[in-house]
Image (cartoon, coloured by chain):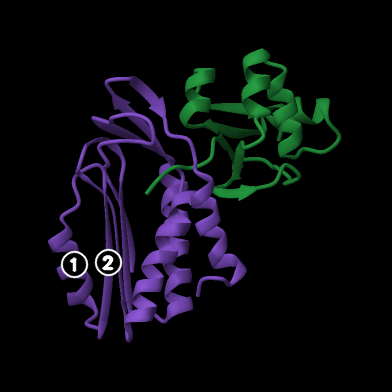
Chain colours: A green, B purple
Amino acid sequence: MASGNVSITIKLFSALREALGESEFELALSDVSEASAQVDVAAIKKLLSQRGADWKEALNQPNLVHALNHKVVFTDALVSEGDELAFFPPMTGG
Amino acid sequence: MSVSLQSEAIDVAAEYAQLVGDSPGAAVATFTGYVRDHSEQHAVTELELEHYPEMARKVLEDLGRSAAARFGLSNWRIVHRFGRLAVLETIVWVGAVADHRGEAISACELIMDTLKTDAPFWKREQGPAGEQWVASRESDAERRARWQSGEAQ
C-alpha cells in the first residue's frame, strides 16, 4: 500500500468546529510522520497548528479534549491508519 | 438495558412502563432533566444540543453497563436528546431497576454525574442576550470525581 494514501479522519465539534469552519476531514499520516518522529495526538496537534493562528489557538486551549476512536485519550496516544481523532471543548450535556 | 439518542421529545410515561415491564423489580428510580429557562447570567429561550453520535452512544452504553455492574441493576435505560429544544422540554431521562432503593437511586446519580462530563454533547443557549456555547462547570467535575474517589458509593 502506498504510504501516501494512508490517512486518519479528524473530527471537530462545538465551538472548535465553529471557530475553524470544518467538521470533518482526512489527514495523510505521511504528513505527520514527515514532521514528527512519533505519530501521536501531540504530533497531529502540532501539524494542524501550522494551518494558521486560529488553528494554533483552538488546538492549544488547556481544556481541549481529544478522543481517539470514541475514547478520551492523552496527547501521547499513538495514532494509526483508519483511526478517528476528534477534538472538542469540555462536554456540557445532561 | 439500552440507550436512545433522539431528537424527538422523551415520552417519560412510555419509557417508565417499558423499563418496569421488561424487568419488574422492587426498587425503581428515575431522573428527568428539563431545559431551564435561565443560565447563570441570562434568560434562555431555546437550547441547541450538538453531539458526537458514535461516541455518545458508546460512552452511554459503557456507563449503563458499569452502573449495572456496580449496583446490581436488573434493568437500566438512558435517553438523551439532541437538536433544538424549547424551554421546559425534556432533555435527558435515566431509569434504574434494582432490589433496593439505595442502589437504584445511586445508579441514577452516578449515571447523571458521569454523563454530564463524559458524554459528548454540547449545549448552545439562545436568549434575548444572543447565542452562546455553555461553559463546563467545575461543580460538575467535582460531582463526577466523588464517584471515582469513593466518597460517593
At horizontal 43% and vertical 34% (from top left) the residue drawn is B134
At horizontal 75% and vertical 29% (from top left) the residue drawn is A32
Kind of residue at badge 1: Tyr
Kind of residue at badge 2: Thr
Q: Is residue B144 above or below residue A73?
A: below
| Label 2 with label 1: CB-CB less than 8 Å | yes
User: Mark 1 sits on what residue?
Assistant: B16
* SS category of the residue bearing label 2: strand
* SS category of the residue bearing label 1: helix
Quadrant that contains the N terminus of chain A: top right
Q: Is residue A10 visible?
A: yes
Closer to the camera in the image, A51 or A37: A51
Q: Residues within 10 Å of mark 2 (few under 14, many from 20)?
A: many
User: Mark 2 sits on what residue?
Assistant: B30
* Residue B101 in picture, x, y percent from top left: 32, 81
Closer to the camera in the image, A69 or B84: B84
Q: Nearer the viewer, mark 2 or mark 1?
A: 2
Q: Is residue A23 visible?
A: no
* Residue B95 in picture, x, y percent from top left: 29, 67
In the displayed structure image, the side of residue A93 where residue B89 appears, left or right: left
* Residue B87 in picture, x, y percent from top left: 21, 38
Q: Earlier in the sequence, mark 2 or mark 1?
A: 1
